[in-house]
Image (spheres, rainbow, N blue to C red):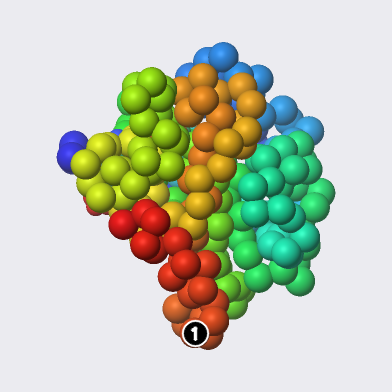
């Protein structure tokens, strides 16, 4: 781990859009970056749910997260990213839901391994606790699966990552943030060659409000992924 940066996490504003687009181009060079109309829609429908991390001394953008609240049962368990996010517009945001859906997290490639991701996830968890939501769910794209796709099924790959036998630069990070794997789904991100479209559906539960039944999905998956 490199030395930590001094990071401030704050709500995203329209002044951040250009820097977010630049960051997108560096993180996902082959993918269309978030458009200004999508980013504007996020802060229109759910301003508290969008966070930006900046370096305290310079104001430089270090990372961002975007998300929305959903009624989880409105969706298929293996729903694709575009369906969970209304094609990135978040117009399906529903404040009566209990699930914060993590639609995006990215950290500047030059500032990784320095605690930026951890800091923005702490802000996400604090939001979920403040709003009294039950959980965060997200699709963790299996970023390094392409290295194993010839020899392992996506499910076996995830099992090995959860056991610590393989490091996946995305899923290993998410597990360190307290997430548990619920399932492995294909066709999640159609245009992502690294994951071959596969993602792990992951969950973090707000223990302050969770009832015993709320752990059912995690308990059911445990034997398959540990
Ligand atoms: C995943 C990502 C957000 C992590 O951000 P980061 O700022 O580098 O993560 P941090 O430095 O805060 O690390 C947090 C923890 O995850 C672990 N971690 C982070 N990157 C890791 C890696 N490549 N391999 C293993 N562990 C890793 C760290 O060791 C740390 O563990 P600790 O809290 O126990 O010390 C960043 O790598 C990224 O932007 N990736 C590209 C975009 C992406 O794939 N997003 C996910 C879409 S589903």
Q: 10 Å neighbourhood of mark 1: few (<14), some, or many (≥20)? A: few
Which residue position is annotated with label 1? Answer: 212
| Residue 15: x %, y % from top left | 64, 36
| Residue 215 x, y percent position in the rendering | 49, 74
Left or right, 81 with reference to 225: right
Q: Quadrant of ligand 1?
A: top left
Residue beneath the point at 49% across and 57% down: 182
Question: Residue at the location (65% across, 20% down)?
Answer: 32
| Nearer-the-camera pick, 77 or 7 | 77
Q: Position of residue 122 (x, y in %)?
A: 41, 59
Check the image and report above or below for 54 versus 212: above
- Can I make out residue 54 in this image? no
Q: Quarter-wise, where is residue 38 in the image?
A: top right
Whether residue 71 is visible to the viewer of this picture, yes or no, is yes
The structure residue drawn at horizontal position 73% and vertical position 30%, both measured from the top left corner, is 36
Q: How many marks?
A: 1
Residue 224 is situated, as x and y percent measured from the top left of the image, at 39, 56
For the point 37% across and 54% down, the residue is: 225
Q: Residue furthest right?
A: 91
Check mark 1 vs ligand 1: CB closer than 8 Å? yes or no: no
Say which element carries label 1: helix
The answer to which of 147 and 15 lies nearer the viewer is 147
Viewer-proximal residue, 91 or 222?
222
Position of 69 relative to 134 (above/below): above
| Residue 56, quarter of the rendered image | top left
* Quarter of the image where the C terminus is located: bottom left
């Amino acid at each position: 781990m490199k030395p930590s940066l001094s990071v401030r996490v704050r709500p995203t504003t329209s002044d951040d859009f250009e820097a977010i687009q630049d960051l997108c181009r560096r993180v996902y060079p082959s993918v269309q970056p978030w458009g200004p109309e999508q980013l504007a829609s996020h802060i229109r429908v759910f301003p508290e749910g969008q966070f930006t991390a900046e370096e305290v001394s310079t104001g430089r953008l270090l990372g961002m997260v975007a998300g929305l609240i959903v009624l989880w049962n409105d969706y298929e368990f293996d729903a694709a990213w575009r369906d969970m996010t209304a094609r990135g517009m978040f117009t399906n945001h529903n404040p009566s839901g209990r699930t914060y859906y993590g639609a995006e997290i990215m950290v500047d490639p030059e500032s990784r391994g320095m605690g930026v991701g951890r800091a923005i996830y702490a802000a996400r968890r604090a939001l979920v606790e403040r709003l009294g939501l039950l959980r965060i769910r997200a699709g963790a794209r299996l970023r390094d699966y392409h290295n194993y796709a010839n020899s392992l099924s996506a499910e076996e790959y995830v099992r090995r990552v959860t056991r610590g036998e393989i490091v996946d630069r995305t899923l290993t990070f998410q597990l360190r943030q307290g997430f548990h794997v619920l399932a492995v789904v294909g066709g999640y991100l159609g245009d992502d060659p690294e994951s071959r479209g596969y993602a792990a559906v992951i969950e973090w539960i707000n223990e302050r409000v969770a009832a015993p039944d709320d752990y059912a999905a995690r308990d059911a998956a445990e034997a398959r992924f540990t």
